Image: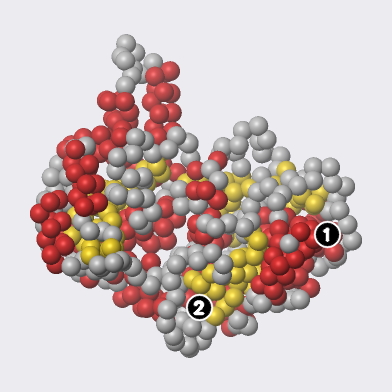
Amino acid sequence: MKYVLVTGGVVSGLGKGVTASSVGLILKACGLRVTTIKIDPYLNTDAGTMSPFEHGEVFVLDDGGEVDLDLGNYERFLDIILTRDNNITTGKIYQSVIDKERRGDYLGQTVQVVPHITDAIQEWIERVAAIPVDGKEGPADVCVVELGGTIGDIESMPFIEALGQFSYRVGVGNFCLIHVSLVPVLSVVGEQKTKPTQHSVRGLRSLGLTPNILACRSTIELDGNVKEKLSRFCHVPMENIITLFDVSNIWHVPLLLRDQNAHEAILKVLNLNGYTREPVLGEWTSRADLCDLLSEPVRIAMVGKYTGLADSYLSVLKALLHASVACHRKLCVDWVPAEDLEVSTADKNLKSYKSAWKLLQGADGILVPGGFGDRGVEGKILAAKYARENRIPYLGICLGMQIAVIEFARSVLGLRNANSTEFDPNTENPCVIFMPEGSKIHMGGTMRLGSRKTYFHGMQSKCAKLYGNRSFIDERHRHRYEVNFNMVQQFEDAGLLFTGKDETGCRMEIVELPEHPYFVGAQFHPEFKSRPGKPSPLLLGLVAAAIGQLDAVLMRSATKTCRRSNGSSHLYEKPKLANGSMDGIYCNGNGLHA
Ligand code: GLN
Protein backbone atom coordinates (compact mmCIF):
# COMPACT_ATOMS: atom_id res chain seq x y z
CA MET A 1 0.00 0.00 0.00
CA LYS A 2 1.26 3.44 -0.95
CA TYR A 3 0.07 6.53 0.95
CA VAL A 4 -0.46 10.09 -0.23
CA LEU A 5 -0.99 12.56 2.60
CA VAL A 6 -2.61 15.89 1.78
CA THR A 7 -2.15 18.68 4.34
CA GLY A 8 -3.12 22.33 4.23
CA GLY A 9 -1.30 25.46 5.25
CA VAL A 10 -1.75 29.23 5.69
CA VAL A 11 -5.56 29.41 5.72
CA SER A 12 -8.49 27.02 5.66
CA GLY A 13 -10.82 26.79 2.70
CA LEU A 14 -8.10 26.31 0.10
CA GLY A 15 -9.92 23.42 -1.52
CA LYS A 16 -7.82 20.72 0.11
CA GLY A 17 -10.66 18.22 -0.28
CA VAL A 18 -11.06 18.90 -3.98
CA THR A 19 -7.27 18.73 -4.40
CA ALA A 20 -7.11 15.40 -2.59
CA SER A 21 -10.02 14.04 -4.66
CA SER A 22 -8.34 15.26 -7.84
CA VAL A 23 -5.05 13.63 -6.86
CA GLY A 24 -7.00 10.40 -6.33
CA LEU A 25 -8.64 10.79 -9.71
CA ILE A 26 -5.42 11.29 -11.70
CA LEU A 27 -3.87 8.29 -9.96
CA LYS A 28 -6.96 6.27 -10.82
CA ALA A 29 -6.70 7.56 -14.40
CA CYS A 30 -3.15 6.13 -14.42
CA GLY A 31 -4.65 2.70 -13.78
CA LEU A 32 -4.20 2.52 -9.99
CA ARG A 33 -6.89 1.48 -7.52
CA VAL A 34 -7.42 4.30 -5.06
CA THR A 35 -9.06 4.60 -1.65
CA THR A 36 -9.24 7.60 0.66
CA ILE A 37 -9.37 8.55 4.32
CA LYS A 38 -10.42 11.92 5.71
CA ILE A 39 -9.14 12.96 9.12
CA ASP A 40 -11.24 15.55 10.98
CA PRO A 41 -9.50 16.68 14.13
CA TYR A 42 -12.70 17.61 16.00
CA LEU A 43 -14.06 15.86 19.08
CA ASN A 44 -17.43 14.86 17.63
CA THR A 45 -17.57 11.13 16.99
CA ASP A 46 -19.09 11.84 13.61
CA ALA A 47 -20.59 14.74 11.65
CA GLY A 48 -24.17 13.65 12.42
CA THR A 49 -24.75 16.08 15.25
CA MET A 50 -23.11 19.05 13.55
CA SER A 51 -25.04 21.89 11.94
CA PRO A 52 -24.95 21.83 8.13
CA PHE A 53 -25.31 25.60 8.21
CA GLU A 54 -22.00 25.99 9.98
CA HIS A 55 -20.05 23.01 8.81
CA GLY A 56 -21.60 22.10 5.48
CA GLU A 57 -23.86 19.16 4.79
CA VAL A 58 -23.69 15.86 6.63
CA PHE A 59 -22.84 13.28 3.98
CA VAL A 60 -24.36 9.83 4.47
CA LEU A 61 -22.67 6.61 3.42
CA ASP A 62 -24.08 3.21 2.48
CA ASP A 63 -23.22 1.83 5.92
CA GLY A 64 -25.09 4.69 7.61
CA GLY A 65 -21.97 6.66 8.52
CA GLU A 66 -22.71 10.38 8.90
CA VAL A 67 -19.51 11.96 7.69
CA ASP A 68 -17.76 15.06 6.48
CA LEU A 69 -18.83 16.34 3.07
CA ASP A 70 -15.35 15.75 1.67
CA LEU A 71 -16.17 12.04 1.59
CA GLY A 72 -18.89 12.98 -0.88
CA ASN A 73 -16.28 14.62 -3.10
CA TYR A 74 -14.20 11.46 -2.93
CA GLU A 75 -17.13 9.22 -3.79
CA ARG A 76 -18.16 11.44 -6.69
CA PHE A 77 -14.68 11.96 -8.15
CA LEU A 78 -13.49 8.38 -7.74
CA ASP A 79 -16.85 6.60 -8.10
CA ILE A 80 -16.18 4.57 -4.96
CA ILE A 81 -18.24 3.59 -1.91
CA LEU A 82 -16.62 4.48 1.38
CA THR A 83 -17.31 3.27 4.91
CA ARG A 84 -17.83 5.26 8.11
CA ASP A 85 -14.30 4.29 9.18
CA ASN A 86 -12.89 6.18 6.19
CA ASN A 87 -13.67 9.30 8.22
CA ILE A 88 -11.43 9.50 11.29
CA THR A 89 -12.23 12.03 14.00
CA THR A 90 -10.46 12.82 17.25
CA GLY A 91 -13.64 11.66 18.97
CA LYS A 92 -13.51 8.22 17.34
CA ILE A 93 -9.83 7.71 18.13
CA TYR A 94 -10.14 8.78 21.78
CA GLN A 95 -13.28 6.70 22.19
CA SER A 96 -11.50 3.60 20.91
CA VAL A 97 -8.52 4.18 23.21
CA ILE A 98 -10.71 4.91 26.24
CA ASP A 99 -12.79 1.78 25.53
CA LYS A 100 -9.59 -0.26 25.44
CA GLU A 101 -8.42 1.33 28.67
CA ARG A 102 -11.71 0.42 30.40
CA ARG A 103 -11.48 -3.13 29.09
CA GLY A 104 -8.07 -3.37 30.70
CA ASP A 105 -6.10 -3.72 27.47
CA TYR A 106 -3.41 -1.34 28.79
CA LEU A 107 -3.35 -2.78 32.30
CA GLY A 108 -0.51 -1.30 34.33
CA GLN A 109 0.35 1.37 31.79
CA THR A 110 -0.16 5.12 31.82
CA VAL A 111 -2.31 5.80 28.77
CA GLN A 112 -0.93 8.76 26.84
CA VAL A 113 -1.29 10.70 23.59
CA VAL A 114 2.09 9.30 22.53
CA PRO A 115 2.19 6.34 22.02
CA HIS A 116 -1.40 5.21 22.62
CA ILE A 117 -3.37 7.78 20.64
CA THR A 118 -0.71 8.02 17.93
CA ASP A 119 -0.56 4.22 17.62
CA ALA A 120 -4.35 4.03 17.42
CA ILE A 121 -4.31 6.56 14.58
CA GLN A 122 -1.71 4.61 12.63
CA GLU A 123 -3.48 1.29 13.16
CA TRP A 124 -6.77 2.85 12.06
CA ILE A 125 -5.23 4.21 8.84
CA GLU A 126 -3.57 0.89 8.00
CA ARG A 127 -6.72 -1.11 8.70
CA VAL A 128 -9.10 1.13 6.79
CA ALA A 129 -6.76 1.63 3.81
CA ALA A 130 -7.07 -2.12 3.19
CA ILE A 131 -10.88 -2.06 2.86
CA PRO A 132 -11.84 -2.36 -0.84
CA VAL A 133 -14.05 0.55 -1.93
CA ASP A 134 -14.27 0.13 -5.69
CA GLY A 135 -16.29 -3.08 -5.90
CA LYS A 136 -13.19 -5.16 -6.61
CA GLU A 137 -11.56 -7.62 -4.28
CA GLY A 138 -8.42 -6.94 -2.26
CA PRO A 139 -6.94 -3.66 -1.09
CA ALA A 140 -6.37 -0.61 -3.30
CA ASP A 141 -2.90 0.37 -4.53
CA VAL A 142 -2.90 3.87 -3.08
CA CYS A 143 -4.64 5.46 -0.12
CA VAL A 144 -5.05 9.24 -0.19
CA VAL A 145 -5.25 10.58 3.37
CA GLU A 146 -6.51 14.14 3.83
CA LEU A 147 -5.75 15.85 7.11
CA GLY A 148 -8.46 18.40 7.88
CA GLY A 149 -7.62 21.79 9.36
CA THR A 150 -4.48 23.83 8.91
CA ILE A 151 -0.93 22.95 9.96
CA GLY A 152 -0.32 24.44 13.39
CA ASP A 153 -3.83 23.87 14.76
CA ILE A 154 -3.72 22.50 18.31
CA GLU A 155 -6.37 19.91 17.42
CA SER A 156 -4.33 18.23 14.72
CA MET A 157 -1.10 17.77 16.72
CA PRO A 158 -1.63 14.08 17.65
CA PHE A 159 -2.44 13.35 13.99
CA ILE A 160 0.67 15.15 12.74
CA GLU A 161 2.81 13.24 15.21
CA ALA A 162 1.16 9.96 14.20
CA LEU A 163 1.58 10.70 10.50
CA GLY A 164 5.24 11.63 11.01
CA GLN A 165 5.82 8.26 12.70
CA PHE A 166 3.73 6.57 10.03
CA SER A 167 5.75 8.03 7.14
CA TYR A 168 8.91 6.77 8.79
CA ARG A 169 7.37 3.36 9.36
CA VAL A 170 6.09 2.79 5.82
CA GLY A 171 9.37 4.16 4.50
CA VAL A 172 10.69 6.22 1.61
CA GLY A 173 8.99 5.30 -1.66
CA ASN A 174 5.69 4.47 0.03
CA PHE A 175 4.67 7.87 1.34
CA CYS A 176 4.13 11.12 -0.52
CA LEU A 177 3.22 14.35 1.22
CA ILE A 178 1.37 17.00 -0.76
CA HIS A 179 1.09 20.31 1.02
CA VAL A 180 -1.67 22.61 -0.23
CA SER A 181 -0.77 26.22 0.40
CA LEU A 182 -1.63 29.74 -0.64
CA VAL A 183 0.40 32.12 -2.79
CA PRO A 184 -1.43 35.44 -2.55
CA VAL A 185 -1.14 37.96 -5.35
CA LEU A 186 -0.87 41.53 -4.13
CA SER A 187 -3.30 43.47 -6.23
CA VAL A 188 -1.34 46.76 -6.32
CA VAL A 189 1.82 45.34 -7.87
CA GLY A 190 0.47 41.95 -8.99
CA GLU A 191 3.32 40.23 -7.16
CA GLN A 192 3.01 36.60 -6.04
CA LYS A 193 4.09 36.28 -2.43
CA THR A 194 5.84 33.15 -1.22
CA LYS A 195 6.31 33.99 2.47
CA PRO A 196 3.07 32.43 3.79
CA THR A 197 3.96 29.15 2.07
CA GLN A 198 7.53 29.29 3.36
CA HIS A 199 6.23 29.73 6.89
CA SER A 200 3.73 26.93 6.68
CA VAL A 201 6.33 24.53 5.23
CA ARG A 202 8.66 25.51 8.04
CA GLY A 203 5.86 24.69 10.48
CA LEU A 204 5.35 21.33 8.82
CA ARG A 205 9.06 20.50 8.99
CA SER A 206 9.29 21.49 12.62
CA LEU A 207 6.61 18.89 13.28
CA GLY A 208 8.61 16.20 11.54
CA LEU A 209 6.92 16.13 8.13
CA THR A 210 8.66 16.98 4.87
CA PRO A 211 6.56 17.91 1.84
CA ASN A 212 7.35 16.17 -1.44
CA ILE A 213 4.96 18.27 -3.48
CA LEU A 214 3.63 21.80 -3.05
CA ALA A 215 0.18 22.52 -4.49
CA CYS A 216 -0.10 26.28 -4.42
CA ARG A 217 -3.48 27.94 -4.65
CA SER A 218 -3.23 31.23 -6.50
CA THR A 219 -5.45 33.28 -8.74
CA ILE A 220 -2.97 32.95 -11.61
CA GLU A 221 -0.22 30.53 -12.65
CA LEU A 222 3.02 30.80 -10.62
CA ASP A 223 5.89 32.61 -12.31
CA GLY A 224 9.09 30.61 -12.87
CA ASN A 225 11.07 32.77 -10.45
CA VAL A 226 8.38 32.34 -7.78
CA LYS A 227 8.62 28.56 -8.13
CA GLU A 228 12.39 28.81 -7.95
CA LYS A 229 12.16 30.78 -4.71
CA LEU A 230 9.70 28.31 -3.22
CA SER A 231 11.91 25.44 -4.29
CA ARG A 232 14.95 26.98 -2.64
CA PHE A 233 13.27 27.86 0.64
CA CYS A 234 11.01 24.84 0.95
CA HIS A 235 13.43 22.23 -0.40
CA VAL A 236 10.96 20.91 -2.95
CA PRO A 237 12.10 20.32 -6.57
CA MET A 238 10.75 22.86 -9.09
CA GLU A 239 8.89 20.15 -11.04
CA ASN A 240 7.07 19.20 -7.84
CA ILE A 241 5.57 22.66 -7.40
CA ILE A 242 2.09 22.80 -8.88
CA THR A 243 -0.15 25.85 -9.22
CA LEU A 244 -3.82 25.38 -8.52
CA PHE A 245 -5.02 28.56 -10.11
CA ASP A 246 -8.67 29.49 -10.33
CA VAL A 247 -10.62 27.44 -12.87
CA SER A 248 -14.15 27.73 -14.23
CA ASN A 249 -15.38 24.56 -12.55
CA ILE A 250 -13.89 22.03 -10.14
CA TRP A 251 -13.85 19.26 -12.74
CA HIS A 252 -10.87 21.10 -14.25
CA VAL A 253 -8.73 20.60 -11.12
CA PRO A 254 -7.60 17.04 -12.02
CA LEU A 255 -6.79 18.30 -15.51
CA LEU A 256 -4.75 21.12 -14.02
CA LEU A 257 -2.77 18.54 -12.05
CA ARG A 258 -2.34 16.35 -15.12
CA ASP A 259 -1.22 19.26 -17.30
CA GLN A 260 1.50 20.11 -14.78
CA ASN A 261 2.60 16.47 -14.58
CA ALA A 262 1.64 16.15 -10.92
CA HIS A 263 0.95 12.46 -11.51
CA GLU A 264 4.55 11.91 -12.62
CA ALA A 265 5.88 13.70 -9.57
CA ILE A 266 3.66 11.64 -7.23
CA LEU A 267 4.43 8.35 -8.99
CA LYS A 268 8.14 9.10 -8.77
CA VAL A 269 7.96 9.72 -5.01
CA LEU A 270 5.97 6.49 -4.63
CA ASN A 271 8.40 4.48 -6.77
CA LEU A 272 5.60 3.66 -9.19
CA ASN A 273 7.08 5.18 -12.33
CA GLY A 274 6.96 2.66 -15.13
CA TYR A 275 4.19 0.64 -13.46
CA THR A 276 1.31 2.78 -14.64
CA ARG A 277 -0.16 4.14 -17.86
CA GLU A 278 -0.55 7.73 -19.01
CA PRO A 279 -3.68 9.19 -17.36
CA VAL A 280 -6.88 8.43 -19.27
CA LEU A 281 -9.19 11.39 -18.71
CA GLY A 282 -10.99 11.76 -22.04
CA GLU A 283 -14.54 11.50 -20.76
CA TRP A 284 -13.77 13.63 -17.72
CA THR A 285 -12.24 16.35 -19.91
CA SER A 286 -15.21 16.47 -22.28
CA ARG A 287 -17.59 16.84 -19.34
CA ALA A 288 -15.52 19.61 -17.74
CA ASP A 289 -15.43 21.47 -21.07
CA LEU A 290 -19.10 20.85 -21.80
CA CYS A 291 -20.04 22.25 -18.40
CA ASP A 292 -18.35 25.56 -19.28
CA LEU A 293 -20.00 25.79 -22.65
CA LEU A 294 -23.63 25.23 -21.75
CA SER A 295 -25.70 28.36 -22.00
CA GLU A 296 -29.37 27.50 -22.14
CA PRO A 297 -30.52 27.59 -18.54
CA VAL A 298 -32.67 25.29 -16.47
CA ARG A 299 -33.93 27.19 -13.43
CA ILE A 300 -34.41 25.14 -10.29
CA ALA A 301 -35.84 26.74 -7.17
CA MET A 302 -34.33 25.28 -4.01
CA VAL A 303 -36.79 25.90 -1.23
CA GLY A 304 -34.96 25.45 2.05
CA LYS A 305 -33.80 27.26 5.11
CA TYR A 306 -31.98 30.38 4.09
CA THR A 307 -28.25 29.83 4.25
CA GLY A 308 -25.26 31.77 3.05
CA LEU A 309 -23.37 28.50 2.87
CA ALA A 310 -23.99 26.57 -0.35
CA ASP A 311 -22.13 23.64 1.23
CA SER A 312 -25.20 23.03 3.41
CA TYR A 313 -26.84 21.42 0.38
CA LEU A 314 -23.67 20.40 -1.45
CA SER A 315 -24.69 16.93 -2.66
CA VAL A 316 -28.09 18.14 -3.88
CA LEU A 317 -26.35 20.89 -5.87
CA LYS A 318 -23.87 18.43 -7.30
CA ALA A 319 -26.62 15.96 -8.19
CA LEU A 320 -28.56 18.75 -9.92
CA LEU A 321 -25.40 19.67 -11.80
CA HIS A 322 -24.86 16.06 -12.93
CA ALA A 323 -28.44 15.94 -14.17
CA SER A 324 -28.30 19.31 -15.94
CA VAL A 325 -25.03 18.52 -17.69
CA ALA A 326 -26.52 15.21 -18.85
CA CYS A 327 -29.46 17.22 -20.21
CA HIS A 328 -27.12 19.81 -21.72
CA ARG A 329 -28.49 22.69 -19.72
CA LYS A 330 -26.74 25.25 -17.60
CA LEU A 331 -27.92 24.83 -14.04
CA CYS A 332 -29.29 28.00 -12.45
CA VAL A 333 -30.23 27.52 -8.82
CA ASP A 334 -32.58 30.05 -7.29
CA TRP A 335 -32.41 29.92 -3.50
CA VAL A 336 -35.83 30.51 -2.07
CA PRO A 337 -35.85 30.95 1.71
CA ALA A 338 -38.90 28.88 2.66
CA GLU A 339 -39.94 31.25 5.45
CA ASP A 340 -40.21 34.13 2.97
CA LEU A 341 -43.03 32.34 1.14
CA GLU A 342 -45.18 32.43 4.28
CA VAL A 343 -47.93 35.04 4.64
CA SER A 344 -46.47 36.12 7.96
CA THR A 345 -43.41 37.38 6.05
CA ALA A 346 -45.65 39.54 3.86
CA ASP A 347 -46.76 41.35 7.02
CA LYS A 348 -43.21 41.87 8.24
CA ASN A 349 -41.22 42.24 5.05
CA LEU A 350 -43.22 42.54 1.87
CA LYS A 351 -40.11 42.87 -0.32
CA SER A 352 -38.70 39.48 0.77
CA TYR A 353 -42.13 37.87 0.39
CA LYS A 354 -42.54 39.18 -3.14
CA SER A 355 -39.04 38.31 -4.22
CA ALA A 356 -39.38 34.73 -2.86
CA TRP A 357 -42.62 34.21 -4.78
CA LYS A 358 -41.13 35.77 -7.91
CA LEU A 359 -38.23 33.31 -7.81
CA LEU A 360 -40.57 30.38 -7.23
CA GLN A 361 -42.85 31.42 -10.06
CA GLY A 362 -39.90 31.85 -12.41
CA ALA A 363 -38.61 28.32 -11.81
CA ASP A 364 -38.74 25.48 -14.32
CA GLY A 365 -38.57 23.00 -11.46
CA ILE A 366 -38.89 23.08 -7.67
CA LEU A 367 -36.82 21.10 -5.21
CA VAL A 368 -37.49 20.85 -1.49
CA PRO A 369 -34.43 19.22 0.10
CA GLY A 370 -34.08 17.37 3.39
CA GLY A 371 -34.26 19.20 6.67
CA PHE A 372 -35.04 19.16 10.37
CA GLY A 373 -37.02 21.44 12.64
CA ASP A 374 -40.13 23.45 11.95
CA ARG A 375 -38.67 26.72 10.64
CA GLY A 376 -39.88 27.33 7.10
CA VAL A 377 -42.09 24.22 6.99
CA GLU A 378 -45.24 26.16 6.13
CA GLY A 379 -43.37 27.91 3.31
CA LYS A 380 -42.24 24.57 1.94
CA ILE A 381 -45.82 23.33 2.04
CA LEU A 382 -46.86 26.39 0.02
CA ALA A 383 -44.13 25.64 -2.52
CA ALA A 384 -45.36 22.04 -2.89
CA LYS A 385 -48.93 23.28 -3.29
CA TYR A 386 -47.84 25.75 -5.94
CA ALA A 387 -45.94 23.03 -7.84
CA ARG A 388 -48.83 20.56 -7.63
CA GLU A 389 -51.53 22.98 -8.67
CA ASN A 390 -49.54 24.64 -11.44
CA ARG A 391 -48.08 21.41 -12.79
CA ILE A 392 -44.49 22.56 -12.16
CA PRO A 393 -42.01 19.66 -11.80
CA TYR A 394 -41.39 19.00 -8.11
CA LEU A 395 -38.92 16.80 -6.29
CA GLY A 396 -39.16 16.48 -2.52
CA ILE A 397 -36.24 14.82 -0.81
CA CYS A 398 -36.81 13.24 2.61
CA LEU A 399 -38.45 16.18 4.43
CA GLY A 400 -39.48 17.38 0.95
CA MET A 401 -41.46 14.15 0.47
CA GLN A 402 -43.11 14.51 3.87
CA ILE A 403 -44.01 18.09 2.91
CA ALA A 404 -45.68 16.88 -0.30
CA VAL A 405 -47.73 14.38 1.71
CA ILE A 406 -48.79 16.96 4.31
CA GLU A 407 -49.78 19.39 1.55
CA PHE A 408 -51.88 16.76 -0.21
CA ALA A 409 -53.58 15.79 3.05
CA ARG A 410 -54.49 19.40 3.73
CA SER A 411 -55.49 20.51 0.22
CA VAL A 412 -56.93 17.36 -1.36
CA LEU A 413 -58.07 15.21 1.56
CA GLY A 414 -59.37 18.32 3.26
CA LEU A 415 -57.58 17.54 6.55
CA ARG A 416 -56.91 21.18 7.34
CA ASN A 417 -54.46 20.73 10.20
CA ALA A 418 -52.68 17.64 8.90
CA ASN A 419 -49.04 17.68 9.91
CA SER A 420 -45.97 15.71 10.86
CA THR A 421 -45.67 14.97 14.54
CA GLU A 422 -42.18 16.44 14.23
CA PHE A 423 -43.80 19.88 13.88
CA ASP A 424 -47.08 19.40 15.70
CA PRO A 425 -46.95 16.49 18.18
CA ASN A 426 -50.68 16.84 18.91
CA THR A 427 -52.03 17.11 15.39
CA GLU A 428 -55.40 15.40 14.82
CA ASN A 429 -54.21 14.21 11.43
CA PRO A 430 -50.70 12.91 11.83
CA CYS A 431 -49.82 11.95 8.25
CA VAL A 432 -46.11 11.80 9.08
CA ILE A 433 -45.13 10.10 12.34
CA PHE A 434 -42.11 9.19 14.46
CA MET A 435 -40.66 5.81 13.50
CA PRO A 436 -41.02 3.15 16.17
CA GLU A 437 -37.33 2.23 16.14
CA GLY A 438 -36.16 5.83 16.63
CA SER A 439 -34.70 7.33 19.77
CA LYS A 440 -35.72 10.70 21.16
CA ILE A 441 -33.11 10.54 23.89
CA HIS A 442 -29.88 10.04 21.99
CA MET A 443 -29.41 12.20 18.91
CA GLY A 444 -26.11 10.89 17.50
CA GLY A 445 -26.38 8.03 15.00
CA THR A 446 -29.92 7.06 16.04
CA MET A 447 -31.86 7.81 12.85
CA ARG A 448 -32.78 5.34 10.14
CA LEU A 449 -29.47 5.67 8.38
CA GLY A 450 -27.73 4.42 5.28
CA SER A 451 -28.56 2.17 2.40
CA ARG A 452 -31.98 0.45 2.46
CA LYS A 453 -33.90 -1.24 -0.29
CA THR A 454 -36.90 0.30 -2.01
CA TYR A 455 -39.18 -2.00 -4.02
CA PHE A 456 -41.24 -0.57 -6.84
CA HIS A 457 -44.97 -1.05 -6.81
CA GLY A 458 -46.16 -0.86 -10.39
CA MET A 459 -43.53 -0.76 -13.10
CA GLN A 460 -45.42 1.94 -14.97
CA SER A 461 -44.53 4.68 -12.54
CA LYS A 462 -42.17 7.41 -13.72
CA CYS A 463 -39.71 6.60 -10.96
CA ALA A 464 -39.59 2.89 -11.78
CA LYS A 465 -38.88 3.80 -15.39
CA LEU A 466 -36.24 6.35 -14.42
CA TYR A 467 -34.48 3.63 -12.44
CA GLY A 468 -34.47 1.42 -15.56
CA ASN A 469 -37.36 -0.82 -14.40
CA ARG A 470 -35.30 -2.52 -11.74
CA SER A 471 -37.42 -4.32 -9.19
CA PHE A 472 -35.63 -2.65 -6.30
CA ILE A 473 -33.03 0.01 -5.65
CA ASP A 474 -30.62 0.80 -2.83
CA GLU A 475 -30.55 4.40 -1.71
CA ARG A 476 -29.30 6.16 1.40
CA HIS A 477 -31.52 7.34 4.24
CA ARG A 478 -31.34 9.74 7.16
CA HIS A 479 -34.64 10.30 8.93
CA ARG A 480 -36.66 9.78 12.11
CA TYR A 481 -40.17 10.28 10.75
CA GLU A 482 -42.15 8.44 8.08
CA VAL A 483 -45.49 8.51 6.27
CA ASN A 484 -48.27 7.18 8.52
CA PHE A 485 -49.13 3.74 7.14
CA ASN A 486 -52.70 4.00 8.44
CA MET A 487 -53.39 6.89 6.06
CA VAL A 488 -51.83 5.37 2.94
CA GLN A 489 -55.10 3.98 1.54
CA GLN A 490 -56.77 7.36 1.93
CA PHE A 491 -53.97 9.04 -0.04
CA GLU A 492 -53.95 6.40 -2.76
CA ASP A 493 -57.74 6.57 -3.17
CA ALA A 494 -57.34 10.30 -3.80
CA GLY A 495 -54.62 9.75 -6.42
CA LEU A 496 -51.34 10.17 -4.53
CA LEU A 497 -49.55 6.88 -5.14
CA PHE A 498 -46.81 5.29 -3.10
CA THR A 499 -44.84 3.68 -5.89
CA GLY A 500 -41.84 2.65 -3.82
CA LYS A 501 -41.93 0.88 -0.44
CA ASP A 502 -39.48 -0.96 1.80
CA GLU A 503 -39.33 -4.75 1.94
CA THR A 504 -42.19 -4.94 4.46
CA GLY A 505 -44.47 -2.83 2.27
CA CYS A 506 -45.31 -0.75 5.36
CA ARG A 507 -42.76 2.03 4.97
CA MET A 508 -43.35 4.50 2.16
CA GLU A 509 -40.23 5.33 0.16
CA ILE A 510 -41.47 7.03 -3.03
CA VAL A 511 -44.59 9.03 -3.65
CA GLU A 512 -45.83 10.18 -7.07
CA LEU A 513 -48.78 11.96 -8.63
CA PRO A 514 -49.25 10.10 -11.93
CA GLU A 515 -51.36 12.82 -13.53
CA HIS A 516 -48.78 15.51 -12.87
CA PRO A 517 -45.84 16.10 -15.29
CA TYR A 518 -43.43 15.26 -12.45
CA PHE A 519 -44.46 15.35 -8.82
CA VAL A 520 -42.17 13.04 -6.89
CA GLY A 521 -41.11 12.63 -3.29
CA ALA A 522 -38.48 10.24 -1.94
CA GLN A 523 -37.94 9.34 1.69
CA PHE A 524 -34.32 8.57 0.81
CA HIS A 525 -31.62 10.96 -0.38
CA PRO A 526 -30.94 10.20 -4.05
CA GLU A 527 -28.31 12.95 -4.18
CA PHE A 528 -25.72 10.96 -2.24
CA LYS A 529 -25.23 8.39 -4.99
CA SER A 530 -25.23 10.76 -7.95
CA ARG A 531 -21.98 10.86 -9.92
CA PRO A 532 -20.63 13.00 -12.76
CA GLY A 533 -21.73 11.15 -15.88
CA LYS A 534 -24.15 9.02 -13.85
CA PRO A 535 -26.80 11.42 -12.56
CA SER A 536 -29.25 10.20 -9.98
CA PRO A 537 -32.45 9.08 -11.77
CA LEU A 538 -34.78 11.22 -9.64
CA LEU A 539 -32.76 14.40 -10.13
CA LEU A 540 -32.46 13.59 -13.81
CA GLY A 541 -36.23 13.21 -13.89
CA LEU A 542 -36.70 16.63 -12.29
CA VAL A 543 -34.35 18.43 -14.69
CA ALA A 544 -35.67 16.57 -17.74
CA ALA A 545 -39.25 17.40 -16.75
CA ALA A 546 -38.24 21.01 -16.11
CA ILE A 547 -37.03 21.34 -19.70
CA GLY A 548 -39.94 19.35 -21.13
CA GLN A 549 -37.89 16.30 -22.04
CA LEU A 550 -38.99 13.75 -19.50
CA ASP A 551 -40.62 11.47 -22.06
CA ALA A 552 -37.41 11.18 -24.05
CA VAL A 553 -35.48 10.36 -20.88
CA LEU A 554 -38.08 7.80 -19.75
CA MET A 555 -37.94 6.14 -23.11
CA ARG A 556 -34.18 5.91 -22.99
CA SER A 557 -34.22 4.55 -19.43
CA ALA A 558 -36.87 2.00 -20.29
CA THR A 559 -35.11 0.77 -23.40
CA LYS A 560 -32.02 0.20 -21.31
CA THR A 561 -29.88 2.57 -23.30
CA CYS A 562 -29.75 4.65 -20.17
CA ARG A 563 -26.49 6.05 -18.80
CA ARG A 564 -25.96 3.03 -16.57
CA SER A 565 -25.08 0.78 -19.52
CA ASN A 566 -21.88 2.63 -20.44
CA GLY A 567 -21.43 5.11 -17.63
CA SER A 568 -21.30 8.10 -19.96
CA SER A 569 -23.52 11.14 -19.99
CA HIS A 570 -26.12 11.24 -22.69
CA LEU A 571 -27.02 13.91 -25.11
CA TYR A 572 -30.70 14.60 -24.82
CA GLU A 573 -30.44 17.62 -27.02
CA LYS A 574 -27.71 19.43 -28.90
CA PRO A 575 -26.15 21.95 -26.52
CA LYS A 576 -26.27 25.66 -27.08
CA LEU A 577 -22.84 26.97 -26.32
CA ALA A 578 -21.65 30.01 -24.42
CA ASN A 579 -19.13 30.76 -21.79
CA GLY A 580 -18.56 31.63 -18.22
CA SER A 581 -20.17 29.67 -15.36
CA MET A 582 -18.43 29.16 -12.06
CA ASP A 583 -18.40 25.55 -10.97
CA GLY A 584 -21.06 24.95 -13.58
CA ILE A 585 -23.73 26.37 -11.28
CA TYR A 586 -25.22 29.82 -11.32
CA CYS A 587 -26.86 30.74 -8.05
CA ASN A 588 -28.84 33.82 -7.23
CA GLY A 589 -28.30 35.90 -4.16
CA ASN A 590 -25.19 35.28 -2.23
CA GLY A 591 -22.57 34.57 -4.86
CA LEU A 592 -22.45 30.92 -4.02
CA HIS A 593 -19.79 28.87 -5.71
CA ALA A 594 -18.22 31.93 -7.24
N1 GLN B 1 -36.93 15.69 9.70
C1 GLN B 1 -37.38 14.62 8.90
C2 GLN B 1 -37.22 13.27 9.57
O1 GLN B 1 -36.45 13.12 10.48
C3 GLN B 1 -36.69 14.61 7.55
C4 GLN B 1 -35.23 14.30 7.64
C5 GLN B 1 -34.47 14.67 6.40
O2 GLN B 1 -34.99 15.40 5.57
N2 GLN B 1 -33.25 14.17 6.27
O3 GLN B 1 -37.84 12.33 9.19
Q: Find residue 569 and report its horizontal and vertical position in percent.
A: 45, 76
- Measured from the top left, where is residue 290 in percent x and y? 41, 79
Instruction: Identify whether 546 is placed above or below 62.
Output: below
Is tag 1's residue or tag 2's residue first in the polypeptide sequence?
A: 2
User: Looking at the image, what colour scheme do you see?
Assistant: secondary structure
The residue at which mark 2 appears reads as 330
SS state under label 1: helix
Q: Locate residue 246, reporting x and y percent.
A: 33, 68
Q: Position of residue 90 (x, y in %)?
A: 40, 35
Q: In the image shown, does 260 or 545 lie closer to the viewer? A: 260
**Camera-side mark, 1 or 2:** 2
Mark yes or no: residue 392 visible: yes
The residue positioned 52% from the left and 57% from the top of the image is: 309
Dot 1 alpha-carbon crowd within 10 angstroms: few under 14, some 14 to 19, many 20 or more: many
The residue pinned by badge 1 equals: 409
Q: Secondary structure at mark 2?
A: strand
- As measured in the structure, the alpha-carbon distance from the residue carrying label 1 to the one carrying label 2 is 35 Å
The residue drawn where x is 58% and y is 56% is 307
